[in-house]
């Protein structure tokens, strides 16, 4: 929005945002900060001597090392999968690029705990190979199993970032370097890699935060990272003050990742300084290298898509559970949706005034309000859930073990996710349309519903869909906050897999994969049309 348009709006509405924009925004900020306050208060209930024992015990160092080792392993695996795949679809003449791109995004439909379910179903006495071929493979578990489960699920985040960067990069930079005698390796190291650094950092940050906060895959693989220890301490009621301190330590670790990413990219300037239009360049011919390239892609997609599909197909068709388990799926699905839908509507409802405040009333305060929405998304899910438990027990006991608390916590965790599409739609809506409405005698409310809202409908719908999909797959927050007996699809899969009931978990895992695949397909289809 231009400065003149902004100043005109200020003259009409005054220098301050209207109360119905400002109050919901401030409520969202308070809601974001409140859980952190209660978590800190709970942690500092320990006396000084106990505090020293809690913070400096040797086990914490072991958990820190395990968490960092897991994160580093997943980042390495995702980079090995995402970078070559993005390179092949953007820089070579490999065939079926749209299909490869689609297959590289589909693993997002297979959550980490479902991927862990598939890996666990391979080996052991009751594994698929033992049942079909009487060949007992070693069961994948521990560190290796956690890295594989999380890496196979999260590599699309990095692929999408790298693909977007490589498609948007001015190819004349590579042509100039090639004309100066640079080899392909030198071009990659000195030109492409620095320009891909922001995409790599963004993808690594999202994946790193997810891995540090993951609970399902880590717990199923029995790998002791911070998230698994937090859940064990809380659920077993061994020491909830210690669980609070573990949550603060995990929060500090996540914050260090955010700070590191900010510092590394602080002074990078990667935009082109020349004028003109970037010229398209013919993709590099693969020649005989197409065969190993396809072999690599087949291995990636068989691992990330074929493995869970094969395991689910086995348990559903070759060794199916009783019909009663299939009949439970619709009820469990509706139970999950009954909580996910109000959470998605509430998240979009909070995101709308915050986005309007940021775009139409830019200031340091509006920027601070917008940045605060990322607290819930950056917080490890178990840390956020534990903070909400302490909040309910100390201040709002009537919310403890209620569906309302679960819905509200999902809203806090996804508010940043809901902000993106609404903010982008609002930025594309010209302010002079509102000016024209005001000049015709319409008030702020009438202008919003007749002029602004119709142009935001697509963004609002996208926000609702994104949050709904997140909540339908979400496990850690649901596991801690769901009312007793209120089992969602995710919780059902986790409970039955952890008990070794692979066949009984299969219908619910398949429902998650099918629903998530349809949602991912809808998003990709809508992006393709735009």
Image (cartoon, rainbow, N blue to C red):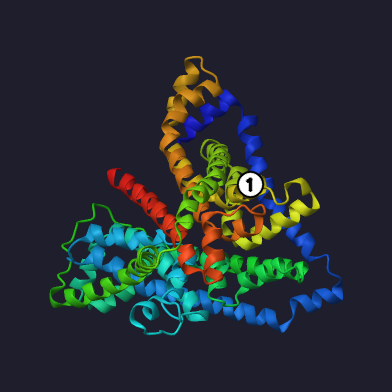
User: Which residue is at 48% across, 43% downward?
Assistant: 464
Report if residue 368 is visible in the image.
no
- Residue, disc 1: 408
Quadrant in which residue 178 is drawn: bottom left
Q: Nearer the viewer, residue 348 or 308?
A: 308
Q: Nearer the viewer, residue 218 or 40?
A: 218
Decide: is 23 above or below 124. Answer: above
User: Which residue is at 79% across, 79% downward?
Assistant: 53
Q: Classify 10 Å Cα crowding around label 1: few (below 14), some (14-19), many (20 and above).
A: some
User: Which residue is at 67% across, 48% downward?
Assistant: 405
Quadrant in which residue 224 is drawn: bottom right
User: Which residue is at 60% across, 65% downward?
Assistant: 255
Q: Is residue 127 left or right of residue 471?
A: left
Q: Is residue 425 left or right of residue 391?
A: left
**Residue 48 x %, y %:** 86, 73
**Residue 151 x %, y %:** 43, 71
Q: Give the position of the N terminus as an image quadrant.
A: top left
Q: Give the position of the C terminus as an image quadrant.
A: top left
Query: Farthest left residue?
Result: 287
Report if residue 14 is visible in the image.
yes
**Residue 11 x %, y %:** 57, 25
Q: Is residue 102 left or right of residue 69?
A: left
Decide: is 167 above or below 293. Answer: above
């Amino acid at each position: 929005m231009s400065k003149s348009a902004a100043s005109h709006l200020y003259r009409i509405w005054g220098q301050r945002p209207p109360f119905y924009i400002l109050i919901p925004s401030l409520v969202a900020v308070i809601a974001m900060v409140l859980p952190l306050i209660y978590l800190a208060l709970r942690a500092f209930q320990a006396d000084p001597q106990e505090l020293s024992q809690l913070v400096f015990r040797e086990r914490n160092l072991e958990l820190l090392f395990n968490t960092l080792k897991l994160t580093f392993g997943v980042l390495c695996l995702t980079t090995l999968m995402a970078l070559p795949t993005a390179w092949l679809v953007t820089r070579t003449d490999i065939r079926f690029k749209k299909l490869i791109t689609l297959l590289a995004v589909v693993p997002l439909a297979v959550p980490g705990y479902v991927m862990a379910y598939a890996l666990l179903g391979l080996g052991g006495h009751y594994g698929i190979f033992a049942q079909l071929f009487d060949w007992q493979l070693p069961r994948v578990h521990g560190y290796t199993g956690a890295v594989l489960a999380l890496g196979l699920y999260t590599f699309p985040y990095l692929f999408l970032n790298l693909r977007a960067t490589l498609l948007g990069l001015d190819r004349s930079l590579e042509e100039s370097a090639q004309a100066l005698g640079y080899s392909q390796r030198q071009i990659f190291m000195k030109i492409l890699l620095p320009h891909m650094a922001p995409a790599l950092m963004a993808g690594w940050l999202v994946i790193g935060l997810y891995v540090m906060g993951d609970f399902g895959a880590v717990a199923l693989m029995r790998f002791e990272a911070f998230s698994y220890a937090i859940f064990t301490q809380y659920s077993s009621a061994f020491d909830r003050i210690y669980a609070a301190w573990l949550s603060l330590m995990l929060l500090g670790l996540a914050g260090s990742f955010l700070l590191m990413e900010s510092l590394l990219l602080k002074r990078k300037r990667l935009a082109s300084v020349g004028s003109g239009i970037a010229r398209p360049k013919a993709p590099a011919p693969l020649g005989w290298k197409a065969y190993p390239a396809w072999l690599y892609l087949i291995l990636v997609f068989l691992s990330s898509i074929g493995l869970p599909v094969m395991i689910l197909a086995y348990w559903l068709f070759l060794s199916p559970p009783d019909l009663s388990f299939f009949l439970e799926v619709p009820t469990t699905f509706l139970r999950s949706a009954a909580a996910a839908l109000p959470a998605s509507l509430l998240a979009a409802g909070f995101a709308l005034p915050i986005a309007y405040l940021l775009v139409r009333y830019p200031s340091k305060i509006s920027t601070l309000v917008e940045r605060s929405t990322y607290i819930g998304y950056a917080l490890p899910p178990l840390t956020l859930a534990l903070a909400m438990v302490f909040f309910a027990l100390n201040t709002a006991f009537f919310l403890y073990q209620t569906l309302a608390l679960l819905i509200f916590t999902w809203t806090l965790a996804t508010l940043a996710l809901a902000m993106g599409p609404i903010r982008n739609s609002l930025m594309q809506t010209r302010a002079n349309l509102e000016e024209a409405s005001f000049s015709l005698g319409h008030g702020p409310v009438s202008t919003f519903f007749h002029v602004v809202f119709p142009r935001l409908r697509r963004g609002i719908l996208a926000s609702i869909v994104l949050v709904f999909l997140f909540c339908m797959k979400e496990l850690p927050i649901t596991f801690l906050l769901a009312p007793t007996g209120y089992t969602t699809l995710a919780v059902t899969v986790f409970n039955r897999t952890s008990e070794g009931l692979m066949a009984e978990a299969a219908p619910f895992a398949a429902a998650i994969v099918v629903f998530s695949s349809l949602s991912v397909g809808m998003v990709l289809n809508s992006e393709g049309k735009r």
